Image (cartoon, helix red, strand yellow):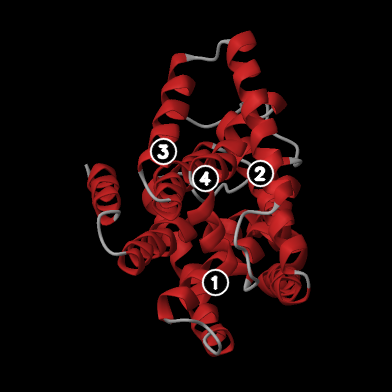
């Protein structure tokens, strides 16, 4: 019920003026989407606490924040290269989360959907968004993004024709495609991020006895995410004065800060997930 209300609210926000619509999408992304990454502390604890005891959090946080800081610096030094890296990493991460292990082609198709469709269906609006994020002139999307989006479309059509995926997968892909067709890119992405990606990641942790053994219910997952989520909000507030100068307005500042921070946090998030997934698994398998 709550998920349906959030979806309806986000969809309705597309009717608002541009800045108000962006603000609604960004607020949903921050409040409902970012907390799934805040569970990285719960994933790191069983890896580090047995070896380092009470020092485990510092040993986790320092390289995690250091890698995030490097990504933020990269946005300032080479924004278009960083944008390309962020999009490629997002395809990889979304696809692995959506398709599961051992399905690389399906992962590429499903992970590429929220990245390619905005470029194909609403290229001008997408360019406008990422011009503000990268803080570079972008009258149209970079050629490499458009070309990659068309290649993704060809591959997706071929995959659909050859592999004939499950009905649930088809329904999800069709629903996402409809969202990106009917809604502004930022709104459609927020729907995907808070409606599918975040909850899917949290449910996977709840069912997994290895990556985060202390997280065995959604309630515990939410409570465990709160401290690092609060720290993330504090870091964002601290960075605000660095992003506000030269910005065309507070909504544009929030847009740039939010998406750059998402990219900065995605890099260590994906790396930690790879390390945790490589741990030996008990024969009992996943918990129910």
Which label sits in the foreground, 1 or 4? Answer: 4
Residue 257 in the image: x percent, y percent?
54, 73
What's the CA distance linking mark 2 and mark 1? 21 Å
- Label 4, on which residue? 118
Q: Nearer the viewer, residue 11 or 220?
A: 11
Q: Earlier in the sequence, mark 2 or mark 1?
A: 2
- What kind of element bears circle 4? helix
Q: Earlier in the sequence, mark 1 or mark 4?
A: 4
- Label 3, on which residue? 181
Which label sits in the foreground, 2 or 4? Answer: 2
Q: Is residue 13 above or below residue 252?
A: above
What's the CA distance linking mark 4 and mark 3? 8 Å
What's the CA distance linking mark 1 and mark 4? 18 Å
Q: Earlier in the sequence, mark 1 or mark 3?
A: 3
Q: Nearer the viewer, residue 79 or 71?
A: 79
**Horizontal relation, residue 215 to residue 135: left or right:** left
The residue at the point 52 percent across, 83 percent down is 247
- Check residue 256 in the rendering and tell me which mark sits there, or answer none: 1
The residue at the point 60 percent across, 19 percent down is 157
- Label 2, on which residue? 146
Residue 34 in the image: x percent, y percent?
48, 60
The answer to whether marks 4 and 3 mark residues whose Cβ atoms lie closer than 8 Å is: no
Mark 1 neighbour density, 10 Å: few (under 14) some (14–19) many (20 or more): many
The residue at the point 66 percent across, 51 percent down is 87
The answer to whether marks 3 and 2 mark residues whose Cβ atoms lie closer than 8 Å is: no
Residue 31 in the image: x percent, y percent?
39, 63
What's the CA distance linking mark 1 and mark 3? 24 Å
Residue 171, visible in the rendered structure: yes
């Amino acid at each position: 019920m709550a998920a349906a209300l959030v979806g309806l609210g986000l969809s309705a926000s597309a009717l608002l003026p541009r800045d108000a619509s962006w603000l609604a999408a960004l607020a949903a992304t921050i409040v409902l989407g970012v907390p799934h990454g805040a569970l990285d502390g719960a994933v790191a604890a069983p890896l580090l606490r047995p070896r380092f005891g009470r020092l485990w959090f510092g040993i986790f946080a320092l390289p995690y924040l250091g890698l995030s800081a490097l990504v933020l610096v990269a946005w300032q030094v080479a924004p278009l290269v960083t944008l390309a890296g962020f999009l490629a990493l997002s395809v990889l991460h979304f696809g692995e989360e959506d398709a599961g292990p051992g399905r690389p082609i399906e992962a590429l198709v499903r992970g590429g959907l929220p990245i390619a469709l905005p470029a194909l269906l609403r290229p001008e609006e997408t360019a406008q968004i990422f011009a503000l994020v990268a803080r570079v002139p972008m009258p149209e999307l970079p050629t490499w993004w458009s070309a990659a989006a068309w290649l993704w479309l060809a591959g997706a059509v071929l995959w659909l024709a050859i592999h004939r995926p499950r009905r649930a997968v088809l329904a999800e892909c069709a629903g996402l495609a409809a969202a990106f067709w009917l809604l502004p890119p930022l709104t459609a992405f927020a729907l995907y991020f808070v409606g599918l990606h975040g909850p899917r990641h949290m449910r996977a942790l709840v069912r997994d006895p290895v990556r985060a053994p202390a997280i065995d219910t959604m309630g515990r997952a939410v409570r465990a995410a709160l401290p690092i989520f609060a720290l993330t909000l504090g870091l964002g507030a601290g960075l605000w004065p660095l992003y506000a100068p030269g910005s065309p307005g507070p909504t544009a500042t929030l847009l740039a800060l939010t998406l750059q921070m998402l990219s900065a946090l995605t890099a260590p998030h994906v790396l930690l997930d790879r390390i945790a997934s490589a741990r030996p698994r008990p024969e009992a398998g996943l918990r129910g």
